[in-house]
């Protein structure tokens, strides 16, 4: 996970503050936007797009197997590689020190259907210095092309793409997925800390308090930060093809709590349902609470919350920073690395 060193190379999206005119002119806005004008000024200061983890596997050319074994032995003896915990999948597992972090590199599969090589690291945590170290080590370990060979021939088996919301807290918004998927929550001391949407074996969405996590690790951040993270697996892309990755954030909306029930529901006979529903949202989060409603009621309530989408979250605008993020994370050809 990201630590404070990742701020050395962030892709920050500044969030414009709503004007007072917008707040006092809600009647001139379309219905879907009218609710937004009722909201207080956004607590979001900026959005930082980053890559929190990447795992790359590769099939090594037969002619290069001997060179890799020799390089492993030589670099381990020189102290450039450190032994890692034994693996059930690979005979050789080593750690590459990247300054603020470590990369795991594995070689020598124990099963014939495993890839020859596996590399896992955190580009955001490694930072520019760590990525430069990784490049130099890979040039020695993979003398037939180093990082650039791996970027072209490797396969991304896992990619964690995150958007950090600076200034946000977990209670500032609700997550509204397009589909009501399996959702789990984690609380501590009565405060919501983490929301998981989808199973851990698939492409999971995770929303959690990054600032709370860092505080527990004794490395507090200067202000509140919420992280929205997509954990993607089996992409079928090489690192050099990540520029083609489709927007992983478009399948959900970020919404606020409407000030009242949906149209037609604000009657003495029905208003209690709204109060009970808000209690359910506080207990379960929005997605699972919607799932408890009847199909017709769920449609009405979903549409009502959809009308209160938060203007500071525009997934297309956030994802437009992806090409620049890949460069800042050094997940492109070395010739395209920033100076």
Image: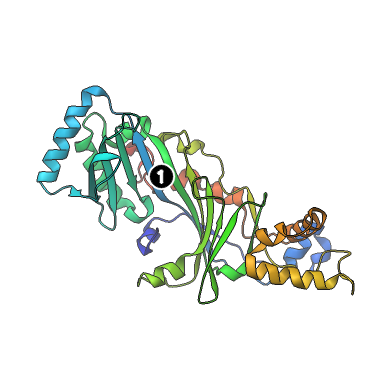
> What residue sits right under mark 1 in the picture?
327
Residue situated in front as seen by the camera: 77 or 91: 91
Residue 39 lies left or right of residue 188; in this view the side is right
Q: Quadrant of the N terminus?
A: bottom left
Residue sitting at x 82%, y 73%: 272
Secondary structure beneath dot 1 equals helix
**In this orientation, which residue lies closer to the viewer: 2 or 120?**
120
The percent position of residue 91, horizontal first and vertical second, equals 23, 39
Residue 270 figure quarter: bottom right
Relative height, residue 299 to residue 232 (above, below):
below
**Residue positioned most to the bottom:** 189
10 Å neighbourhood of mark 1: few (<14), some, or many (≥20)? Answer: some
The percent coordinates of residue 247 (x first, y second) are: 56, 44
Name the spot of residue 271 as percent of width and height, x first: 84, 72
Q: Look at 26% across and 52% down and name the residue there.
A: 98
Is residue 297 toward the left or the right of residue 206 in the image? right
Q: Residue at x 40, y 72 (%)?
A: 215
Foreground residue, 307 or 208? 208
Report the number of numbered marks.
1
Q: Is residue 79 above or below residue 211?
A: above
| Residue 148 visible to an observer of this rendering | yes
Q: Residue drawn 42% across and 39% down? A: 157
Left-right relation of 150 to 264: left
């Amino acid at each position: 996970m990201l630590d404070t060193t990742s701020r050395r190379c962030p892709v920050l999206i500044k969030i414009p503050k709503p004007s007072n005119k917008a707040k006092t002119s809600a009647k001139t806005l379309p219905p879907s936007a009218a609710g937004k004008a009722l909201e207080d000024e956004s607590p979001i200061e900026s959005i930082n797009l980053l890559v929190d983890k990447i795992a790359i596997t590769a099939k090594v050319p037969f002619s290069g197997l001997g060179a890799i074994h020799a390089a492993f032995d030589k670099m381990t003896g020189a102290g450039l590689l450190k032994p890692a915990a034994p693996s059930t999948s690979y005979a050789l597992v080593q750690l590459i020190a990247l300054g603020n972090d470590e990369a795991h590199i594995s070689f020598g599969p124990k099963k014939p259907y495993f890839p020859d090589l596996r590399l896992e690291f955190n580009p955001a945590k490694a930072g520019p210095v760590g990525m430069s170290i990784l490049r130099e080590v890979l040039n020695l370990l993979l003398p037939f092309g180093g990082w650039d060979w791996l970027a072209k021939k490797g396969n991304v088996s896992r990619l964690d793409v995150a958007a950090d919301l600076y200034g946000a807290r977990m209670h500032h918004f609700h997550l509204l997925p397009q589909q009501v998927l399996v959702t789990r929550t984690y609380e501590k001391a009565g405060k919501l800390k983490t929301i998981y949407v989808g199973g851990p074996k698939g492409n999971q969405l995770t929303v959690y308090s990054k600032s709370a996590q860092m505080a527990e690790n004794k490395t507090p951040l200067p202000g509140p930060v919420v992280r929205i993270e997509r954990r993607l697996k089996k992409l079928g892309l090489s690192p050099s093809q990540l520029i083609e990755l489709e927007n992983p954030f478009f399948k959900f909306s970020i919404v606020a709590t409407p000030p009242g029930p949906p149209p037609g529901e604000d009657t003495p006979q029905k208003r209690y349902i709204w109060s009970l529903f808000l209690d359910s949202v506080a207990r379960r989060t929005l997605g699972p609470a919607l799932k408890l409603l009847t199909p017709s009621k769920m449609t009405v309530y979903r549409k009502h919350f959809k009308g209160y989408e938060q203007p500071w979250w525009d997934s297309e605008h956030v994802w437009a920073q992806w090409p620049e993020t890949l460069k800042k994370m050094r997940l492109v050809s070395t010739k395209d690395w920033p100076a």
